[in-house]
Image: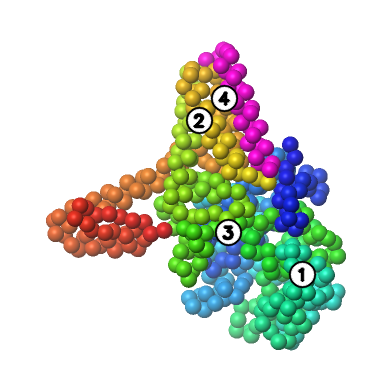
Amino acid sequence: MVLQVFNTMSGVEEEFKPISGNRVNIFVCGPTVYDYSHIGHARTYVAYDVIVRYLRFKGYSTFYLMNITDVDDKIIERSKERNTPPLTLSEEYTREFYCDIAMLNISSINLFAKASEHIPEMIDQITRLLEGGYAYKVDGDVYFDISKFRDYGRLSHQNPDELKKHRIEPDPRKRNPGDFSLWKSRSRDELGWESPWGWGRPGWHIEDTAITETYFGPQYDIHGGAIELVFPHHEAEIAQAESVSSKRPMVKYWIHTGMVNVRGQKMSKSLGNFVTIRDVLRKYSPNVLRFFFISSHYRSPIDYSEANLENAHESLRRVVKAHAEAASALRDARSAEDRNDLEFSKVTAESRRRFMEAMDDDFNTPVALSVMLSFSRRLEAYAHLRPAKRTLQEGLSVLRDFASILGIDLSEARVEQPEITDALIELIVELRDEARKRRDWATADKIRERLASLKISLEDEPEGTRWQMKV
Ligand SMILES: [Zn+2]
C-alpha cells in the first residue's frame, strides 16, 4: 500500500516518496522554552510521534530532528520579570519540556537542537543572504527583503504583493512593511553574540533554517508544526532557505497539525483556560491523553474537555482489558486448530489490513483506533472460546503492533494509575473530615491549603466534603 500525505503546499493528498531512497528526514518546530508546555504543544508532538512511528513501521529509515528555541524575546522578557539570566531560565524549561515529552511516551525524536548552540551557523546563513542581495542591513539590524523572493506566500496561499504591505515588526527603516528580522542588534548588557553587524541575537525564523541546513542540507522530506506557524514562520523559512541555496523546494511535504480548543473556546492565557500538560497528567494518565489526541485526525481541530477525556479513558480501558485477557488465555490455549480458529485468523488479517489502510490515508488515526477497538473486542471474545495458541498469539501480536504504532502502552498499570491518585485524594479528604469531627481545625485547614496548592479544591457540604481538581 502506498502512503498518502496531505501537503499544505499543494493543498491535496500526495503519494509519499522520500527524496532519497528509503531515507526520511523530518524536522518539527519545537517549543520556545519560557513556560510549561500546554496541551496544544502536546497534541502536535504526539501527532508527529505517531507519524514517525508509522514511517519506521513501514520500513523508512527516519531521522527526526526538533529545534528548541532557547533564544527569544519572550524568554528575555520572562527572565527580567524573574530576575534570572535568560539562558538559565530557558535551560530550566528545556528540562521540563524533556520531562513532558518522556511522560507522553514520545520516544521518536533523534536529536534536539538548541538555537543557542547554533549561533555561528545562523550568522553564516545571514552572511550568505546579505551577499546574495536577499537581505539588507539597517544600522546593526539585518532584515530579509521579501520583494526579492518571488514565491513569498506560496505555502499560505497568499498574494506576495499583499504580503509586502502586511506589517510585521514595525520599523520605519524597513524596505517593505512585511520584511522580517534575521538579526536584531542589542545593547551589550543584554543576551547576545558578536556578529559582523555588532552585538545582537538572531531572529526566530533563521534559527530553524540554520539548524536544518546543518543536519539535513538544503533540502529534506518533511517539515511539521502547528497550523498557526504557516505564516509568517514557515513562509519565512522557505524564503531564507531557498534564497540561500537556490534549490527548491526546501521541503517536499509540509504537514501541519490543527488547533486545540478548550471546552469549545480557543485556549489563551487571557481567557484563563490555559491547560498545561502537567495539569492534565495530574488527573489522567499520559496514555489516556494520547488516546484522546489520536481519536481525532491530526489536521482537525480538537476540543479538550473532561467528558472527551473520560470517553478516551473508557475506550482505552476496554483495549487494555481485552489485551490482558487474551494474554492470560494463552496459558490454557490448545495447540490444534479448527475452523473457528481459521475464522479468527481471517478477522486478524482483515483488521490489520484496515488499520494500515487507515494509516496510509494521511495517518487517519481515528479510523485506525476504531479498527483497534473493534478488533480488541473480537480478540477478547475469541480468547474466551478455548482458543488455539498460534491463532491467539497472532492476534495478540497484531494488537501490540497497533498499540506500538500509536504509542499506547497496553500494560494496565499505566492506565489505571489515576484511579490510585483519586483513591489517595479521597483518603486524604476522609482523614480531614475526621479531623473536623474532632474539631481539629488546624489540621483540617492545613490539609485544605496543601491540597489547594496542588490545584485540588474542597467544598464542605452538609452531606460531606466534595473535592475537585482544577484543570
Ligand atoms: Zn520553527
Give the residue at x 37% y 44%: 419
Q: Earlier in the sequence, mark 4 or mark 1?
A: 1
Of residue 455 and residue 4, the one placed in the foreground of this image is 4
Q: Is mark 1 within 8 Å of ligand 1?
A: no
Looking at the rendered structure, which numbered label has been put on residue 159?
1
At label 4, counting other C-alpha atoms closer than 10 Å, the crowd grade (few under 14, some 14-19, many 20 or more) is some
Where residue 68 sits: x, y (%)? 62, 63
The answer to which of marks 1 and 3 sits earlier in the sequence is 1
Hey, what amino acid is under mark 2? Arg
Residue at the spot x=63%, y=56% of the render?
257
Q: Residue furthest left?
A: 438
- The answer to whether the residue labelled 1 contacts the one labelled 2, judged by CB atoms less than 8 Å apart, is no
Residue 210: percent from the left, percent from the top? Answer: 74, 66
Q: Identity of the amino acid at label 4?
A: Gln
- Going from N to C along the chain, the mark reached first, 1 or 2, is 1
Q: Is mark 4 on a helix, strand or loop?
A: helix
Q: Which residue is drawn at 42% across and 54% down?
A: 282
Residue at the disc numbered 2: 377
Contact, CB < 8 Å: mark 1 with mark 3?
no
Which of disc 2 and disc 4 is earlier in sequence? 2
Kindly indicate the quadrant of the structure image that contains residue 125: bottom right
Between circles 4 and 2, the one closer to the viewer is 2
- Give the residue number, with chain letter if any, for mark 4: 393
**Stretch in magenta:** 334-361
